[in-house]
Image (tube, grey):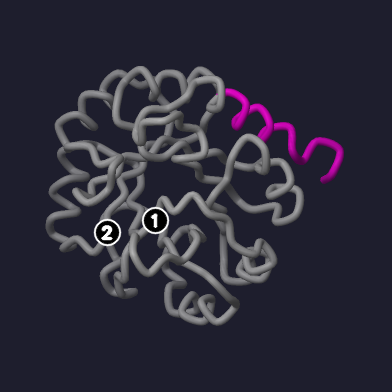
Amino acid sequence: MVRIKICGITNLKDALAAVEYGADAIGFVFYNKSPRAVTPGIAKEIISKLPPFLCSVGVFVDEKPSEIENVVNYVGVSIIQLHGSETPKECNLSRKVIKAIRVKDLTDLEPLIKYRGVSAFLLDTYSPYIAGGTGQTFNWDIAIEAKKFGRIILAGGLTPENVEEAIRLVQPYGVDVAGGVEGTEKGIKDHKKLRLFIERARNALRGYV
C-alpha cells in the first residue's frame, strides 16, 4: 500500500478534509520563507483536534537541531522531515527522520548512501532558488533507481492527473503533495483536488501488484 502525505497544511479545515479522504500523514512547514509556513502554535492547535493513528510531519530547512527539537516537542509531531542541506549527523534526532533530496539527474543520488540512518528519503525536484514546492516533476526513473537506498517518498509536481502513473511506474513507499492539491492560493487546499488525488493514489496499484 502506498502511503499518502498531504503537505503544507495551514488550517484545521484542510487537515480534517485530508483525514476524511484517507490521507496517512499531513505535513506542517516550519520554514518562514515558504508560502505554506505555519507557526508552531497553529500546528499544535490543529494536531490537538486530529484523530489518533494519523501521522503528523514537521518540515524544516537547515534549522538548528536544538530548535527542531524545541518545536517538535512543543507541537507534538510524529516525524521530522529535513528539506535542506543537513548532514547525516544533523539527521540524528529524537524522532524518525525523512531526508528530502532534490534531484535533477542520477548523480544527485550519490549522497544517499551516507544517510543510511534515516527512515525514508523524499525525492523532490531540484531548483536553485527554492528548497521545495516547485510544482515541477523530475525523471521518475531516478526514483526507481533510488529505491535501492531505502524507502522512497515521491514528491515534485504530483497532481490528481499524474499520481496514478507515477505510482504505477515507481511503486514508491509513499507520495507527497502540496501545491498539486491547491487552488489559486498557496497554502489553501482545493478539496475536490485533494479528494481526487487520494482516491487515485489509493487505486493506482490495484491489479498491478
Q: Residue at x 33, y 59 (%)?
A: 82
Please report the bounds of the magenta region as a residue range. Answer: 195-209
Q: Is residue 163 above or below residue 136?
A: above
- Direction from residue 64 to residue 195 in the image, left or right: right
Residue 172, percent across and down?
64, 53
User: Which residue is the site of mark 2?
Assistant: 61
Q: Is residue 209 above or below residue 53?
A: below
User: Which residue is the site of mark 1?
Assistant: 132
Type of amino acid at the residue the image marks with label 2:
Val
Q: Are marks 2 and 1 in contact (CB under 8 Å)?
A: yes
Q: Nearer the viewer, residue 190 or 20?
A: 190
Residue 3, percent across and down?
57, 41
Q: Quadrant of residue 68?
A: bottom left
Q: Secondary structure at mark 2?
A: loop
Q: Quadrant of residue 15?
A: top left
Q: Secondary structure at mark 1?
A: loop
In space, the residues marked 2 and 1 are separated at their CA atoms by 10 Å
Q: How many dots with numbers?
A: 2
- Direction from residue 186 to residue 152 in the image, left or right: right
In this view, which residue lies farthest toward the front? 184
Q: Residue at x 57, y 58 (%)?
A: 152
Label 1 Cα neighbours within 10 Å, binned few <14 / some 14-19 / many ≥20: many
Q: Is residue 197 magenta?
A: yes
Q: Nearer the viewer, residue 156 or 206?
A: 156
Q: Is residue 109 magenta?
A: no
